[in-house]
Amino acid sequence: MHYLGVDVGSVSVKFALIDQEKNVIDTLYMRNHGVIPTVKKGMAQFREQLPSDIEVSGVGATGSGAGFSKVLIGADVHKTEILAHAIGTLHFVPDVSVIFEIGGEDSKVIFLRNGIITGFEMNRICSGGAGAFLDSLAGRLNIPISDVGHLALERENEVSIASRCTVFATTDAVHKLNSGYRLEDVLMGVCNGLVRNYLAMLYRKVSPPPYTFQGATSRNVALRYALEQQLGAEVIVPPYAACLGAFGAAILALENGTTQTRFKGFQLADFEYQIRSFICQDCENHCEITQILQSGEPIASNGSRCGKRNF
Amino acid sequence: MKVGIPRSLFYYKHPHLWVTFFEELGQEVVLSPPTNKTLLEAAVRFGEDESCLAVKLVFGHISYLMDKCDAIVAPAYYGLQPGRYSCPKFLGVPDITKSIFRERIEFLRCEVDDGEFEPGMRQLAHTFTKDRHTIERVISRALDSRAEHKHRLHQRYRKQLASEKRKIVVIGHAYVIHDAYANLNLLAKLQDRGMEAITTDSVPPAPHESFLKWDFAYETMGQLKEVLSHDIAGVIVLSNFNCGVDAITVPFVEHELEQHDIPCMHLILDEHTGEAGMITRVDTFVDTVKMRERA
């Protein structure tokens, strides 16, 4: 018996498979290039790397793109990424007090007490200070995103980069590079600024450790370093830190006690899926309806304010 | 005369007051429809960029009314309670309208200071009729309709308190929490998740001392005191981006709730139409509230 967790975020899609004892069989992290092709490709690729005797008894979906993917994959439970992350983290760090998660477009801080979520903060109006900003800056500087952290730790001088708004931060970083600052110093300045802005926005209630740091950004050693420096405490990066949401979703699927899973199998490539969107003309709201079609028939639909076109 | 009332801002605080006032004066009232996509787009196009969404929306509603009426009601509320102040942005609506729209339209102003409606209403009514008895009757009917509305809200609040469901208090300006299109239907989302959504405008404020000078801040702290004397599961504060009054109010609310160990979530809205972010936050908040009970 195995349980699959799928976390569809704005920047990446994560898969995790666990057994009945919550042992991780494997995980997969992929860039999101459109929900349908990525989930399809991911499922096929994940199947390749798994042992052959897998029997999926339940599926959990999470993440901002879970709405469609749960239909696509046939998920039995659908929970928010905050809950999924908390459940996943508690498995490895049962006494965790604060979870710091910097995602692609969403940043979060989750507060816990005795294994219970007591509160959470998510970025509000603006996704500045999240991972996608670092990604686009790295792209602009022509550095692989995976090198940013190591390069930044080789800094020699403190460089201060504006952190309030990432548009300004980019301008500031590019300007400083053009006026001769070392790349490593500027990158560390950006990482420091990102963490400073993140903590200033979301971490206003100070709680005691243990702290964890996760999401794909936790692979960036400079961000982890900046976080530890600014918090003045050690930060644990749990195992599978980039895929903890998917792992949590798998646990939720296991604990859901599903007897008959809706799982459609790993071979989604056999199905022909399309996304269609149109403007509903029934009233003044002109809602943008998006539908997912399987062999020409809509199997999920959302976007309707009044609800009549949502299913 | 056809009198246009934008369904925005203080309309939501006392929906019947100005309708009654002008109908009693024998005028025809044209009310703009609830905010919809067309009005929101007009608001974003016409609204000046430093305003919050609610102030932008009033221009969306005015653009709808422009060719449907002879004059538009733009009450100038300096303060709705003695010694306290409303948001100054509302006062500029007639002047900003002049600079935005090429068409010209008359504005019917009524100044309200220290919560005193009568002097301004008397002045305004005088431009329609010189008959003193009529004027006094119009004013008392209008103010009665406002009092009745408040009474109905309080009744609903007491009914909601008696409900078996978990109670989530939604704090916000009436024009934010009741503009369902602009706030992505937050109240319905809470109800769909089995919650009893209590909006603060229905809560009679408990007597309290406060140095807060803004109407909204002062009233909210009193309403918070009242709801905290009951069993509530959580509080959601709903703000518009760029709201200065909320910037002052919300930290006081959060501090108070922390003292009482009640979960609080602050949502800030702008012209979003994507609901995913809102759904994630509401779902998580509801999960958190339920999880805490089991602890």
Image (cartoon, rainbow, N blue to C red):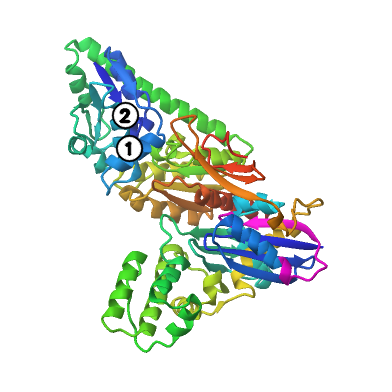
User: What kind of element bears circle 1?
Assistant: helix
Residue labelled with disc 1:
B42
Q: Amino acid at mark 1?
A: Ala
Which quarter of the rendered picture does the C terminus of chain A lie within? Answer: top right
A77 is higher (above) or lower (below) than A48: above
Residue type of the residue flagged with mark 2? Tyr
| Residue at the spot 29% in from the left edge and 27% down from the top edge | B65
| Residue B9: quadrant of the picture | top left
Q: How far separated are the C-alphas under marks 2 and 1?
A: 9 Å
> Considering the numbered disc 2 on the image, is that residue within a helix, a strand or a loop?
helix
Most foreground residue, A138 or A7:
A138
- Assess whether residue B15 is covered by the magenta stretch: no
Label 1 lies in what chain?
B
Q: Which residue is mark 2?
A: B64
Q: Position of residue B118 (x, y in %)?
A: 24, 24
A266 or B219: nearer the viewer = A266
Residue range (magenta): A47-65
- Pointer 1: residues within 10 angstroms few (<14), some, or many (20+)? many
Q: Quadrant of residue B23?
A: top left
Magenta stretch: includes residue A48 = yes
Establish if B98 lies above or below B139. Answer: below
Q: Earlier in the sequence, mark 2 or mark 1?
A: 1
Comparing A8 with A122, the one in front is A8
Rendering coords of residue A42 (x, y %): 65, 64
Residue A91 visible in the snapshot: yes
Q: Badge 2: few (under 14), some or many (20 or more) residues near its Cα, within 10 Å?
A: some
* Residue B293 visible here: no
